[in-house]
Amino acid sequence: MFDRLWRGFHHRDIEKRIARHGWTGIYVGDYHEAPTWAYTIGFLTALGAPEIIVFDVPKGGADGIFQEAYAQLKSGDLALRDGEAWPAANGRAVWRKVHPSRYEDEENAWLGLAVTFDTVLWPASRVAEAQARPLDFEAFQLVLSDDDGHFPWEPEYDERLRPRQRALYEPAPQTEKL
């Protein structure tokens, strides 16, 4: 029972933050264990834009990324495209489209909260024009380079960083069913 009350409180809190700012960030992890990540909820319903996910960036840095991306998406200065560099990030960063199999992948079940808010809960409380838009969930991962400017798909990438930055742009691994 306590779990259901907590979830209800958490959902109302998220809805209030989205109503106030158009979006909210969800920050997961303690930055002592890998991976840690942050993702947005509300970009889809507020802007008709994909949600954003970033790994291994402290809360303040992730929040800055989300604020800048939201402002650029809102002004039309940013259109998320798979494989496109984003010069607004410090160092090299590339947008990668999250593979649809990741939305239902048990390992990435945390994405379910964003999917649920964007396609079920939040649109019901939005104004008519937001409800009139088709709400097909989509997300992009901002993939950061290592210190030498290499990305995870490049052979020179620093392998020590791989566990800290999941490759959500790749299909979810298939699990064997018994």
Image (cartoon, grey):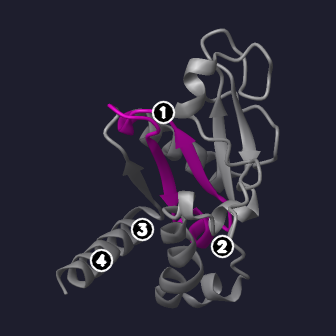
Check the image and report above or below for 86 versus 29. above
Tag in front: 1 or 2:
2
Considering every residue shown, the one lying at the far top of the view is 148
Amino acid type indicated by mark 2? Leu
Q: Marks 2/3: CA distance?
A: 41 Å
Residue marked by disc 3: 18
Near mark 3 (Cα within 10 A), the count class, few <14, some 14-19 or many ≥20, is: many
Tag in front: 2 or 4:
2
Q: Earlier in the sequence, mark 1 or mark 3?
A: 3
Q: Which residues are magenta?
A: 32-60
Check the image and report above or below for 39 versus 55. below
Tag in front: 4 or 3:
4
Amino acid type indicated by mark 4? Arg
Considering every residue shown, the one lying at the far left of the view is 2
Residue marked by disc 1: 56
Residue marked by disc 2: 178
Image quarter where the C terminus lies is bottom right
* Image point (62%, 87%), residue name: 131
In x, y percent, where is residue 157?
A: 70, 17
Q: Earlier in the sequence, mark 2 or mark 3?
A: 3
Check the image and report above or below for 78 versus 106. above
Mark 3: which secondary structure? helix
Amino acid type indicated by mark 1? Asp
Residue marked by disc 4: 7
Q: Marks 4/3: CA distance?
A: 16 Å
* Image point (73%, 60%), residue name: 174
Q: Marks 1/4: CA distance?
A: 26 Å
* Image point (57%, 48%), residue name: 53
In x, y percent, where is residue 32?
A: 32, 31
